[in-house]
Amino acid sequence: MTTDLIPVPATVRIAVRGGGTFPVRRIYCVGRNFVEHAKEMGMTAPTSKTDRGHPIFFSKPADAIVTDGIVPYPPATDNLHHEVELVVALGQDAPAGILPVADAERLILGYGIGLDLTRRDLQAAAKAKGLPWDSAKGFDHSAPVSELIRIADIDDPESLELSLSVNGRLRQQAPLHQMIWNVAEILHELSRLYALRAGDLIFMGTPAGVAALRPGDEFVARLADVVELRGTVIQY
C-alpha cells in the first residue's frame, strides 16, 4: 500500500453554469493569435492564413487559476499586464494521433472568459537574452477565469466579442472572428504536440490593448453578454 508523504494537493475546479464543476488538468495558452496584438508587441504579423505558419504555445500551472476574482499583485515585477482571452474547456479526451479540425468541436465542454496575466518586464528581459519566459507567464494567480458556459448554450462563440474594462474604462475589445487560428484549428495544432485530455483549458490569445494593472484596480472581462469575470488586484 502506498502512503503519501505529503498532503495531496487539491484539484482546482471551475464552476459550470447550470450545475457541476470542471476539474482542471492542464492550461495551454496561445500567443500572438490576434494581428494587432502581435504588432503592438513588435512582432511581424501574418497578412493572410497562408502565411501564418504555426501557432505559438506556452503553459501555465493548473493551480494558477483564480476563480474568486481576487488577484494578488505578484512579486518580482513592476509591470503586470492584462490579456483578456476566450477560454476553451475540454470535456473529452482526444483520440490518439493528430486531431482532425472537423472533429475538434466534439471535445469541447464549454467556454469562459479569462485573463492571461503577464509579468511583462520579466518577459521582455528574457526575450532580449533569448531565454525562456516561463516566469513571466506561469506564476501564482496568473489565470483568473470566469464560470464556464456549456457549448450547447452558445450558438457560435467565434461570432461574439470579448472585452476588458479597468476601473470603468475600456482597454481591450475585439470580435473573436479576428483570431488568426480559430478554436478547432488550435486544438488540431495542439494535438500535434500533446495528448489532449478532459480537464484541459486553452486560453486562446488576446487582442491589442494590453496594459498595466496596479493594486486597487478593478477589472471586468466580458464575452459579449454571455459571461463576465469581475475582479480586483490587491497588494501582494
Image (cartoon, rainbow, N blue to C red):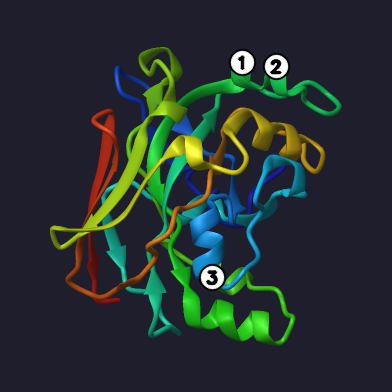
Q: CA distance from mark 2 to mark 3?
A: 33 Å
Task: State if disc 3 and disc 2 touch (CB < 8 Å).
Answer: no
* Among the two numbered marks 2 and 3 on one chain, the one whose residue lies closer to the N terminus: 3
Q: Is residue 42 above or below residue 206?
A: below
Q: Position of residue 113 (x, y in %)?
A: 37, 41
Q: Residue 163 vs residue 75: left or right? A: left
3 and 1 marks in contact (CB < 8 Å)? no
Q: What residue type is disc 1 on? A: Arg
Residue at figure coordinates x 54%, y 70% from the top left: 41
Tag 3: residue type? Met
Give the residue at x 67% y 44%.
Answer: 48
Location of residue 170 in the rendering, given as x and y in whole percent from the top left corner:
22, 56
Question: Do the CB atoms of the residues marked 2 and 1 lie less than 8 Å apart?
Answer: yes
Q: Which mark is residue 85?
A: none
Q: Which residue is mark 1?
A: 106
- Image quarter where the C terminus lies is bottom left
Whether residue 129 sits left or right of residue 67 in the image: it is right
- Which residue is tagged 2? 103
Q: Badge 1: few (under 14), some or many (20 or more) residues near its Cα, within 10 Å?
A: some
Relative to 22, say whether 33 is above or below: below
Look at mark 3 in the image and give the residue it sits on. 41
- Dot 2: what SS? helix
Q: CA distance from mark 3 to mark 1?
A: 34 Å
Farthest-out residue, top = 152
